[in-house]
Image (cartoon, rainbow, N blue to C red):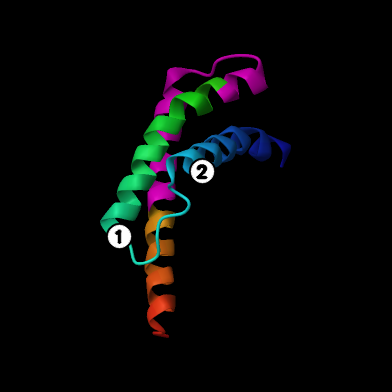
Amino acid sequence: MAGVVETALPFVLGWSIAAIFLGAISVPRGSALSEIVKRSAVTWVLAFPFIVVLRALLLGRWSPWTFYLVAFTVASVMLLGWRLLFALWERRWATGSP
């Protein structure tokens, strides 16, 4: 379990900090789905270098570039998928549909 936390912590912190500063968390209600995905994607791309440095500082070493390539790709799919699903759920909730 500690390994999961150690691996995920820089990603969660990096995304959260960048999302706050870049406005990806507080996307106005009723925004187009494309706008939500676009903001999330831009935030992810801009946050990733910070995440890489943060991870290296926490581990005391750099990881292989292949780790970062796979992590960026997999986390992109997970993050953008989650943001899209959340936006769809929020839109459905706002309209009162079951």
Q: Which residue lies furthest to the top in this view?
A: 61
Q: What stretch is highlighted in magenta?
A: 54-80
As helix, strand or loop, the secondary structure at mark 1 comes to helix
Q: Which residue is drawn at 71% across and 42% down?
A: 1
Image quadrant of residue 41? Answer: top left
Image quadrant of residue 73? Answer: top left
Q: Mark 2 points at which residue?
A: 20
Give percent across and percent down for residue 79: 43, 48
User: Between marks 2 and 1, how big is the CA–CA gap?
Assistant: 19 Å
Up the image or down, 12 lies above or below 83; here it is above
Amino acid, disc 2: Ile
Q: How crowded is mark 2: few (under 14 residues within 10 Å), some or many (20 or more)?
A: few
Q: Residues within 10 Å of mark 1 (few under 14, many from 20)?
A: some
Image quadrant of residue 47? Answer: top left
The answer to whether residue 73 of the structure is visible from this angle is no
Amino acid, disc 1: Leu
Up the image or down, 9 lies above or below 87; here it is above
Q: Residue 33 carries which label?
A: 1
Q: In which quarter of the image is the C terminus?
A: bottom left
67 relative position to 61: left or right: left
Do the residues under discs 2 and 1 have CB atoms within 8 angstroms? Answer: no
Mark 2 or mark 1: whose residue is earlier in sequence = 2
Between 68 and 85, the one nearer to me in the picture: 85
Give percent across and percent down for residue 8: 59, 38
Q: Residue at x 39, y 76 (%)?
A: 92
Give percent across and percent down for residue 87: 39, 63
Q: Which residue is drawn at 38% across and 71% down?
A: 91
Frontmost of labels 2 and 1 is 2
Task: Tell me, yes or no, whether the highlighted magenta stretch contains residue 39.
Answer: no
Main secondary structure along the magenta-highlighted residues: helix
